Amino acid sequence: MTQDFYSVEQVAERLGLHVKTVRSYIREGKLNAVRIGKQYRIAHADLAALTGGAVPPPLRERVTRNRKVAVSAIVEIDAIGREAADRLTTHLLGAAGAREPASAERLRVQSLYDAERAHLKLIVLGDAHDCGRMLSLADALLEQPQ
């Protein structure tokens, strides 16, 4: 969104600077501004001249545009036999490898089985959507009769 004029606060946000720094740039003549009442307004062309080209988007837009959400889930299952643990792990590993490549983040599933305690630990790493699907699949497989 291109505007004709920016406030001091908008310029500070776009450049990742403090408002006082932008005001000092104006006072020192590094940044041209027009005073309207008690506030300064900076023209788009003047801001572009200061930055040496294109005006960057506001900082919060840059941050949210590249946001990545990652999930690490640890599932511990007691009283599970070796055969059931192997079946569950095989299904989850197969589902992780067969998911559509639309997701840029790789989904990882790791398992550790302790035969003495009949205990399975699953570790699922990836984006929130894929991890949620893996946990739902694990729950559905555990509900099936053995």
Image (cartoon, helix red, strand yellow):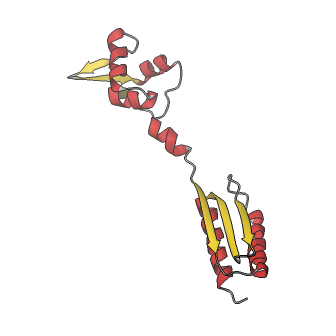
User: What residue appears at the point 64 percent right and 63 percent down from the top-left corner?
Assistant: 130
Taking depth in this image into account, of 106 and 57 the one nearest to the observer is: 106
Taking depth in this image into account, of 47 and 109 the one nearest to the observer is: 109
Task: Find residue 109 and report its horizontal and vertical position in percent.
Answer: 71, 63
- In this rendering, the answer to whether 13 lies above or below 117 is above
Please tell me in which quadrant of the rendered image residue 114 appears.
bottom right
Horizontal side of 106 relative to 54 (left or right) equals right
Taking depth in this image into account, of 53 and 124 the one nearest to the observer is: 124
Task: Find residue 29 and report its horizontal and vertical position in percent.
Answer: 37, 10
- In this rendering, the answer to whether 40 lies above or below 128 is above
Q: Could one spot residue 24 in this view of the protein?
A: yes
- In this rendering, the answer to whether 106 lies above or below 84 is above
Q: Could one spot residue 4 in this view of the protein?
A: no
- In this rendering, the answer to whether 90 lies above or below 26 is below
Quarter holding the C terminus? bottom right
User: What residue appears at the point 56 percent right and 53 percent down from the top-left corner?
Assistant: 69
Horizontal side of 68 relative to 60 (left or right) equals right
